[in-house]
Amino acid sequence: MNTAQHDLVVLGGGPGGYVAAIRAAQLGMNVACIDENERYGGTCLRVGCIPSKALLESSHLYHDAKTSFSNHGLKIGDVELDLPTMMSRKEKVVDTLTGGINMLLKKNKVTTYNGRGRFISSDTIEIEGKSPARVKAAKTIIAVGSRPMSFPSIEEDGVRIGNSTMALSFPEVPERLVVIGGGYIGLELGSVWNRLGSKVVVLEALDRILTGIDSELASIAKRTFTKQGLEFKMSTFVESAKVQGDLCVIKTKAGETIEADRVLLATGRVPSTDKIGLDAAGVATDKRGFLEVDANYQTSVPGIYALGDCIGGAMLAHKAMEEGVVCVERMTGMGSHFNYDVIPAIVYTHPEIAAVGKTEEQLKEAGIQYKKGMAPYGANGRAHTLGETEGRVKVLADAKTDRVLGVHIIGARAGDLIAEAGAAMEFGASAEDIARCCHAHPTLSESLHEAALGVDGRALHTF
């Protein structure tokens, strides 16, 4: 078998991997990118972010057509669900975006290899698949991502009990769906099937949902989701789940037995570092399988770098993309920077939940004195025209310097609104800076402006 030589080989074609490969090619490197799937884009594009958001949008429109269109004077009669067409649209979106990535890699002259890559030495990777190959490079980036966590007591068959990938493609709307885990994946997919007609029960081991999100917003979200029809069982530890006949039987440690048609296991993700030949490369992992890297994303082995989900931290596609850019730019001597304190996080339920920076709990724990400004969506004109008056914006600023430390939003289009907050924080803005910026009227962004005014007790449109 011949060995192809490259300047840089990227193992993994997900958000972090393909972005790193493209940026490296832009900087003049001879780059190869390896992925075991024919379609590049990783979990995010193929079976994660993109397909789930497509279903969230379609299911929201279906729900609105049934419940809210009449409020706008739109009478459309009975609304019927065509699930196969909804699923087909989802796949078309995925195909379009993954196809676009293949075109970008080709345009930037990145050599692509389809197959499972495995280190056979610190500078050589062997690729298994339809077209076996071997590649060698002075520098390698490991960007293999993560996969859903599994448990021996949860007997996944991939049909009735399984992870988020399974829940993206149910052939029919389950009458009863149990979601194990109250994080963003479980709540997003639980919301999809709840809107389409399932009775959804969320089992969460903790006493709150959405850990990591500001607790005040998480409490509001739970009340809102309950009104929408989701049922929550908090502090509930699942002892086992298995298929019995045509039913799924879930048993909790408290002795409760719950029956369902389908079970979605959504309890987090683990790094996919176990089958890529790390021993042969001499790269060690921690006890959870994550790779440890230095400030330049280099592992303990010179020339081998890692980024994205497999190095831990926020398991978010945009975090991996930024790491991909910074990693390859630093390889070439550029002084690139990534501010880990300003990474937006979004939950695409309805209403959306978005956050950037510190929560109140984190500030209190760190002993940082802060001021808070709040603005309800109900005081916003655009929210009323949209029929989306449920929600609020919270701005947290340093009590002495007024520098914005965190922004937390629950409400319509929160995921878009958080971008302004992130940009402001990246430039070290104060709440006064945001308050002094003229915001167009009527827009939802005025709620951020109002909350920034509220930090100093100067809110103009809030009681």
Image (tube, grey):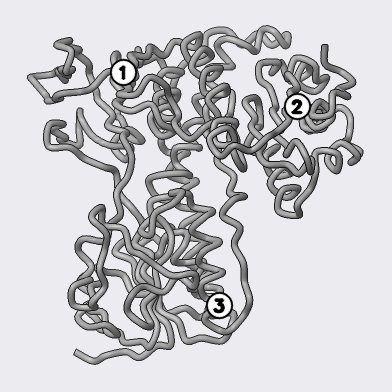
Quadrant of the rendered structure where residue 276 is? bottom left
- Type of amino acid under label 2: Gly
**Relative to residue 226, is residue 148 drawn left or right?**
left
Extreme-front residue of the structure: 367
Q: Quadrant of the N terminus?
A: bottom left
Please say if 336 is above or below 37.
below
Per the image, the residue denoted by label 3 is: 330
Q: CA distance from mark 1 to mark 2?
A: 32 Å
Q: Position of residue 62 (x, y in %)?
A: 53, 20
Q: Please, what secondary structure does the residue beneath circle 2 have?
A: strand
| Along the line of sight, the residue nearer the viewer: 366 or 444 | 366
Q: CA distance from mark 3 to mark 2?
A: 39 Å
Per the image, the residue denoted by label 1 is: 235
At label 1, counting other C-alpha atoms closer than 10 Å, the crowd grade (few under 14, some 14-19, many 20 or more) is few
**Relative to residue 343, is residue 132 drawn left or right?**
left
Q: Residue at x 58, y 84 (%)?
A: 333
- Type of amino acid under label 1: Ser
Q: Which mark is residue 192?
A: none
**Relative to residue 152, is residue 389 drawn left or right?**
right
Q: Position of residue 100 (x, y in %)?
A: 52, 61
Q: Is residue 272 visible?
A: yes
**Relative to residue 450, is residue 261 drawn left or right?**
left
- Type of amino acid under label 3: Arg
Please say if 461 is above or below 313.
above
Per the image, the residue denoted by label 2 is: 373
Q: Of the two numbered discs 3 and 2 on the same chain, state the one appearing first in sequence.
A: 3
Q: Residue at x 26, y 90 (%)?
A: 3
